[in-house]
Image: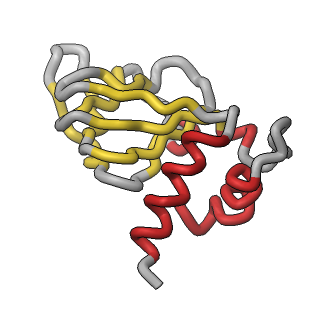
Amino acid sequence: MNTQKTTIEFLKDFSINCKLVQKKSFRKNEIITTYIQKRNQVCIILSGEADLVRYDLNGNKSIIEHFSQNDIFGEAFYIVTTNNELSVEAKKNCEVLFFIYDNIHQKCTQNCKFHSILSENFSNLI
């Protein structure tokens, strides 16, 4: 069984059928999200590439992490203990799923099978 294909198919169906997720498109160099505001947000890249970047007080940019298809990121996974601004920037055109970490283990109001599968397998994804 092709796990990569299964993951891609699941995420596509999840983005269409679950009401607790949002799918958004971003162009190259657009900001996907910042880690300034604590939203407990989880993001999954459906296509494209992005970088987690830090800007210091002098405006210098450092790439902290690189993300590509099926990678998971979000401030729910990164404890911000610095005064530096962290953001995720699209390096290529991207499609990204957004959902709230706190909703992973709660039953979906639509009782969708995709949300159930995600909550059962989330620890395997990360």
Q: Position of residue 52 (x, y in %)?
A: 31, 37
Q: Is residue 55 left or right of residue 86?
A: left
34 relative to 11 in the view: left or right:
left
Residue 107 appears at what percent x and percent y? 85, 45
Q: Residue at x 42, y 79 (%)?
A: 2
Q: Is residue 6 left or right of residue 95?
A: right
Residue drawn at x 26%, y 39% is: 51
Residue at x-position 25% and y-position 32%: 90
Instruction: Examine the image and state in which quarter residue 21 appears.
Output: top right
Question: What is the total number of numbered labels drawn onto the structure image?
Answer: 0
Measured as percent of width and height from the top left, residue 88 is found at 33, 31
Protein image colouring: secondary structure
Quick check: can you spot residue 39? yes
Looking at the image, the residue that sits furthest to the top is 58
- Examine the rendered structure and indicate whether residue 15 appears above or below residue 123: above
Residue furthest bottom in the image? 1
Residues 23 and 37: in front is 23
The image shows residue 64 at horizontal and vertical percentages of 27, 43
Closer to us: 12 or 85: 12
- Which image quadrant is residue 106 in? top right
The residue drawn where x is 63% and y is 63% is 123
Q: Is residue 65 visible?
A: no
